[in-house]
Amino acid sequence: MKKQQTSTKINIQPLGDRVLVKPESAEDERTASGIIIPDTARKEKPERGAVIAVGAGKRGDDNELIPVAVKVGDTVVFSKYGFDEVKIDDVDYYIIQESNILAVIK
């Protein structure tokens, strides 16, 4: 089985059909009228991020390996509550099952 390479030096390998994602940082935003909405006022977690590492895939009913459809470097949109949070070297990441990834942003 071939191991996926990560673009950063993270010593974690997701298992099965899981994907390690670094969520987009929530920066201050402005409304159309110029009002600044600080990060502390927004309660929503990011729903998109960059793929850092991917698992090998999952086994189908015939025991054949089905590889993960996304790859390292992709920017993905995922379900709002479909992830587990992990902290590695003081950086927050999400571990997401492939079924909770909704789209790849091209």
Image (cartoon, rainbow, N blue to C red):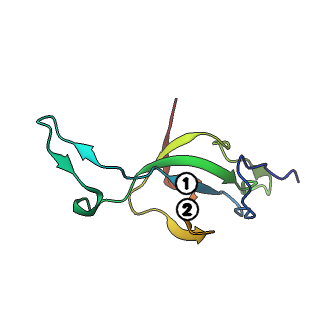
Amino acid type at mark 1: Lys
Mark 1 residue crowding within 10 angstroms, few (<14) / some (14–19) / many (20+): some
Residue that lies at the very extreme toward the left in this rendered image? 33
- Name the residue nearer the viewer: 98 or 12: 12
User: Is 28 placed above or below 92 here?
Assistant: above
* Marks 1 and 2, how far apart at CA: 5 Å
- Name the residue nearer the viewer: 30 or 56: 30
Quick check: can you spot residue 79? yes
Q: For this view, does 18 lie left or right of residue 36?
A: right
Residue 97 placement (x, y as % from top left): 57, 59
- In the picture, which quadrant includes the N terminus? bottom right
Residue 40 placement (x, y as % from top left): 26, 63
Residue appearing at x 25%, y 55% in the figure: 38
Residue appearing at x 68%, y 53% in the figure: 53
Residue bearing mark 1 = 22
Amino acid type at mark 2: Tyr
Q: Are marks 1 and 2 in contact (CB under 8 Å)?
A: yes
Residue 77 placement (x, y as % from top left): 46, 45
Quarter of image, res 57 = bottom right
Residue 82 placement (x, y as % from top left): 45, 62
Residue appearing at x 67%, y 44% in the figure: 72
* Element type where label 2 sits in the image: strand
Residue that lies at the very extreme toward the right in this rendered image? 1
The mark nearer the N terminus, 1 or 2, is 1
* Mark drawn on residue 93: 2
